[in-house]
Image (tube, rainbow, N blue to C red):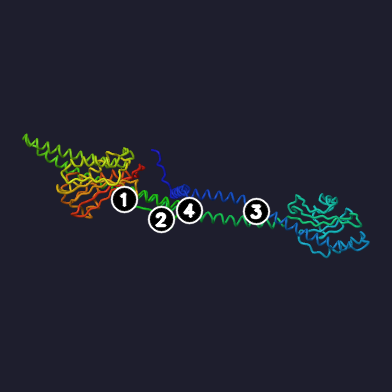
Amino acid sequence: MPPESPLPTDGSSSAHSRKALWRRLFNETRSRILLLYGLLLLLVTGLSIPLFRYLLFASVDTRVQQDLNQERDKFLTSYREWESAPEQTTEQLKAFVTERFNEVLIEDDNFHLMLIDGKLFYSNPLYLEEPLRPNSQLFQQWIQIEQPTASEYRSGLPDIGKILYTADPIRLEGKRRGTFITAHTSAGERQEALVGVYLLIQIMGVVFFISLLLSWLGAGKLMAPITTLARTARSISDSDLTQRITTPRMNGELAELTHTFNAMMDRIQSAFDSQRSFINDASHELRTPITIIQGHLELLDSDPQSQQETIELVLDELARMGRLVSDLLLIAKSERPNFLQREPIEAWDFTEEIFNKAIALATRNWKLTLETHSVQFTGDRQKLTGALLNLLRNAIQHTHKEHTIALGCRALKNSHDRVQFWVRDTGKGMTLAEQQRAFERFARGPNRRTEGSGLGLAIASAIVQAHNGKIDLESQPNKGSTFRITLSASEPGPSPHV
């Protein structure tokens, strides 16, 4: 038998867990945002440090050049005062230079040189760096200078660096006899500047990592609603749709996302509650005829008369079930965009058609009222006919022969783009509790002589809502009820459905 594979040790298991943790952290959105932020920050830092170094060196060179110009101006001012005396000679010039150089205390890395007749006469300090000494390339350039000059020379030596200088020819009796030079080696200044650059890099490194840490924590706080949204979405099931995301003191896109999610959940919960209630009510309503049919079929005997009675009862119950299913399908279809087949309708002619159909339903004191002028509106003639006939059948079921049922139509005052229909009866009316649930599916009032399924008013409400209209109920016990349907005279857009 082959040897069994060894079980993973605690060390390998721990390493695997750490690897999984790092993989999960990297896959997080805030980690990727942080990575992008870090790369952008590194790019900006990488570009800013050379720019800072360049500007710092340029600032140092400018300051050094200003110092050299000040020292040059002091010497030339003294020289002009000395030159103003009559009969000055070369020997007297050498004495003046020696005295002047010995009196001046110059700064570090600065040099004063006096060239007379093409040779170095005196320097302060006496020790000169190699590029400043006689026979050097720079020295040969100084010998040939005829005009005041301020320039720089790259020595190529790291401990000397760039040399900044000013050179002024010295004349006696109109003849060029020498050159006064102020020079500065920039290596020391630049080393001090580089110390500042290195210090800046260290500070920016610390700031970089602190920024990443704070950004990580801040991104986690900003992304918390999304994490909560995911957790809430995982906790939602068809048995619990009450979970919502709280948004304390939040603005912007995340707040809008949270509000949108909560609004969506409200609509879904409403749809589920409506569906659950619909299924419960439908199952309750269908259970009765099924039980009746089943019970009579089980007791069916061989007597022909009894069989005929049972068949008639079964057919009646089946017909009632068919009407119930048709009504349920109509309500379900009312939420579809293509539920309505719109056409222009003349309000007065349409109302008269409905009235002529209604008076054949039952014996009542019927009245037709057409107010103001006729108005044309756009709607589904067949569906609106069914809605109004349902209201009229409801009025019939809650009235007696001596009661009055009125059907009316009018264009609303100060609003010619709306048309209103109403059905008014003088029956027993409804209590406030009955009014509140009048448009619910399978709603029936107590002690009412109702032969329908309890879906008539629900169907009427669904049809009106599909037209973007409004249906209202006004009723008082023992004083009758009034149903009003208000529709737009112009063609409405598609109605929103959950």
What's the amino acid at mark 2? Answer: Thr
Q: CA distance from mark 2 to mark 1?
A: 21 Å
Mark 2, residue position: 247
Numbered circle sitting on residue 196: none
Examine the rendered structure and indicate whether residue 329 appears above or below residue 261.
above
The crowd level at tag 4 (other Cα within 10 Å; few <14, some 14-19, many 20+) is: some
4 and 2 marks in contact (CB < 8 Å): no
Mark 3, residue position: 52
In this orientation, does residue 56 appear?
A: yes
1 and 4 marks in contact (CB < 8 Å): no
Residue 392 horizontal/vertical position (percent) = 21, 45
Mark 4, residue position: 219
Relative to 462, is 190 on the left or the right? right
Relative to 12, is 391 on the left or the right? left
Of labels 1 and 4, earlier in sequence is 4
Looking at the image, is mark 2 or mark 1 nearer the viewer? 2
**Regarding mark 1 in the picture, which secondary structure is present there?**
loop
The crowd level at tag 1 (other Cα within 10 Å; few <14, some 14-19, many 20+) is: few
What's the amino acid at mark 4? Answer: Ala
Relative to 53, is 388 on the left or the right? left
In this orientation, does residue 271 appear?
A: no
3 and 4 marks in contact (CB < 8 Å): no
Mark 1, residue position: 240
